[in-house]
Amino acid sequence: MRISSVAWFAGWAWTLIAAGSGLWLLFTAGPWPPTNGWFALFSGLAACPLLAPSLKKCAGISISGWQQFAAAALIFVAGHAALAIWPHS
């Protein structure tokens, strides 16, 4: 199995788990406080394997897999930092 195949599967897994759980949190707990699922949702969307080809086709922006992974991880870490600043009640 090639590295690109593993990255593709990992991207889809991250998308489905993070974006799905973030969306579920938003539906069940509501959109407030801002940490309720928003960071998970956007982290999952940033990791989606369809993002890079869509940006290339529609906006002419080329991003690498590493940039996409770094953005998703940064959003994920920012969500955990936000929980420390704005804890759930």
Image: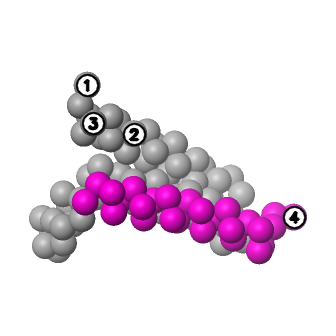
Residue 22 appears left or right of 51: right
| Residue 68 in sight from this viewpoint | yes
Dot 4 or dot 1: first in sequence order is 1
**Mark on residue 3?**
3
**Mark on residue 10?**
2
Closer-to-camera residue (19/8): 8
Q: Amino acid at mark 1?
A: Met
Q: What is the crowding at mark 4: few (fewer than 14 residues within 10 Å), some, or many (at least 20)? A: few
Dot 4 or dot 2: first in sequence order is 2
Residue 48 position in % (x across, y down): 35, 52
For disc 4, the marked residue is 89
Identify the residue at image location x=23%, y=31%.
Answer: 2
Tag nearer the camera, 4 or 3: 3
Residue 51 position in % (x across, y down): 28, 58
Residue 61 appears left or right of 76: left
Q: Amino acid at mark 3?
A: Ile
Secondary structure under badge 1?
A: loop
Residue 38: quadrant of the picture: bottom right
Dot 1 or dot 2: first in sequence order is 1
Which segment did they paint magenta? Answer: 64-89
Secondary structure under badge 3?
A: helix
- Inspect the magenta stretch and tell me whether residue 70 lies in it: yes
Q: Which quarter of the figure is the N terminus placed in?
A: top left
Closer-to-camera residue (37/8): 8
Dot 4 or dot 3: first in sequence order is 3
For disc 1, the marked residue is 1
Secondary structure under badge 2?
A: helix
Mark 4 and mark 2: span between their CA atoms?
A: 33 Å
Q: What is the crowding at mark 3: few (fewer than 14 residues within 10 Å), some, or many (at least 20)? A: few
Q: Which color mode does the image show?
A: one colour
Pointer 1 with pointer 3, Cβ within 8 A:
no
